[in-house]
Amino acid sequence: MADPLERQIEQAFQPGVFIHDQMCFSFVRGLEEVAAEIGRLAGADPVRAAALIETFLAGCHEKAEELDDSSGSFGQFVHELICGWVQARQASDRDADETTSRLLAWMVDDPYGFCCRIEEAVAGAFNQAGIAAFEKQVRARFEAAAAAEPAEGEPSGERPAHLRHHWGEVLRAIYLKQENVTAYIALTEQIGLSAQDCHAVATLLATDGKPEDALAWTERGLKLAQTIPRWAGAEHDLTRLQRELWVRLGRGDEALTAAWANFQKHPSKHTYDGFMEYVPEADRSAWHEKAMNAAQNADLGCLVDLFVGTNETECLAELVRGTSDEALEHLSHYTTEPAAGRLEEIQPGLAARLWRAQGIRIVNAGKSKYYDAALSNFESAKCCYERAGLTAEWEALVRQVRARHGRKSGFMPGFEALAAGRRRTRQASFLERAKLRWGKRYEREQP
């Protein structure tokens, strides 16, 4: 092992040590540091850099069964490594067809899934000659799969159809990178058009200064998304692009009308923002009032989010006042916590009900790892009840928790301490501890 960088690669892999998921991020960071050194080498000696990256890739395959990559960070690192290999090969003027052939061989023989969707990354790494070679060889594989007969014993057309679909997906990524609308459309005519394809084509046409053509493709995509359930996920992107194109074409009123209709159908902070971006500044107050009136029958959680997000504190208070405790207990803490924080100063009694709902939801579910959060919620509820002069409500809550959860030994000691009036000792958060330690270190370093 003559090359000193190879020794660094070997050390970074920690041979024989199993890397658990919790350790994977820091492990990958060590690999990235070595890869960065190779990257700096690539400008002066791309041939050596390409060879070292191949060694690195070999090590990744060898290490694959000695680590848990649940986070996906190791796989992402391999993607970046392959892109670096492509760029190093190009910098050393290696034959583009040879580079592509080797890459495709890795994509076919991929026992650990390192090359899954790699085409999206490498399409950006290739230069003009490289992407042309990549397209040519992938196209050949696509055509071969289209003409192939199923192997003996396989269901009719299953294997060729799978390969045709796979290489078709790779071609999609290539044509998007090339911004080759004509080739992309021709490909969809061969393998079928999806709503996602319509969005891709419309985006390319919009970028190319053809908003009217792009609009036609968004409308086509929306029809597909609305009729084929598995493509419904593309509807949001298509709808947003359609409205942007309407504005570009001087049809802003249509964008507002469509966005307003969507808000009326699904009132929420998200759809509120969606239509308000098309409302002229002078008309925003009137449209805001119109929206608040239209949202009265929306889902409870969406209404809470809407009133918090639009600073409609009085509407929020009225909503909480008219909602049962049981209904509040079914809301996510992502919804109730901001609402409680908004109401604490002006309506502490209502805020107490929201804090109470969060705590009850946790202990009812028996989620022991969140008991500390439940105690924090109950402490906030107690403070708010006291500020509102509602000590009887707090005492009733204490009796309810004791009756229903008295056997939960991981929770009740802390709750009984809270009920007895002893305030919980708040643990400093990670960042608070970090800033405190950093501040002390800075003070020590002062002259």
Image (cartoon, grey):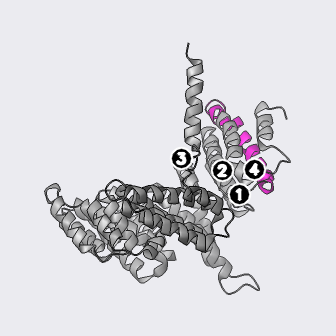
Q: Is residue 429 left or right of residue 326?
A: right
Tell me, yes or no, whether the two marked residues, 3 and 2, touch with CB atoms within 8 Å: no
* Magenta stretch: includes residue 44: yes
Q: Which mark is residue 60?
A: 4
From the image, give the main secondary structure of the stretch colored magenta. helix
**Residue 290 appears in the figure:** yes
Q: CA distance from mark 4 to mark 3?
A: 26 Å
Q: Please name the amino acid that badge 1 sits on.
A: Trp
The answer to the question of whether label 4 and label 3 lie on touching residues, with beta carbons closer than 8 A, is no
Which label number is shown at residue 322?
none
- Number of other residues with Cα within 10 Å of mark 3, as a class: few under 14, some 14 to 19, many 20 or more: some
Extreme residue in the top direction:
447
Label 4 near label 2: C-beta < 8 Å?
A: no
- Label 1, label 3: how far apart the Cα atoms are: 20 Å
Q: Quadrant of residue 163?
A: bottom right
**In this view of the protein, which residue sits in the foreground, 201 or 388?**
388
Q: Is residue 50 visible?
A: no
What kind of residue is marked 4? Cys
Pointer 2: residues within 10 angstroms few (<14), some, or many (20+)?
some
Q: In this figure, which residue is indicated by the disc labeled 2?
A: 99
For the record, the magenta segment spans 38-66
Residue ID at (58%, 52%) = 122
Q: Secondary structure at mark 1?
A: helix
Disc 4, SS: helix
Task: Give the label on residue 127, or none.
Answer: 3
Which residue in the structure is indicated by mark 1? Answer: 106
At horizontal 33% and vertical 70% (from top left) the residue drawn is: 321
Q: Are marks 1 and 2 in contact (CB under 8 Å)?
A: no
Q: Amino acid at mark 3?
A: Asn
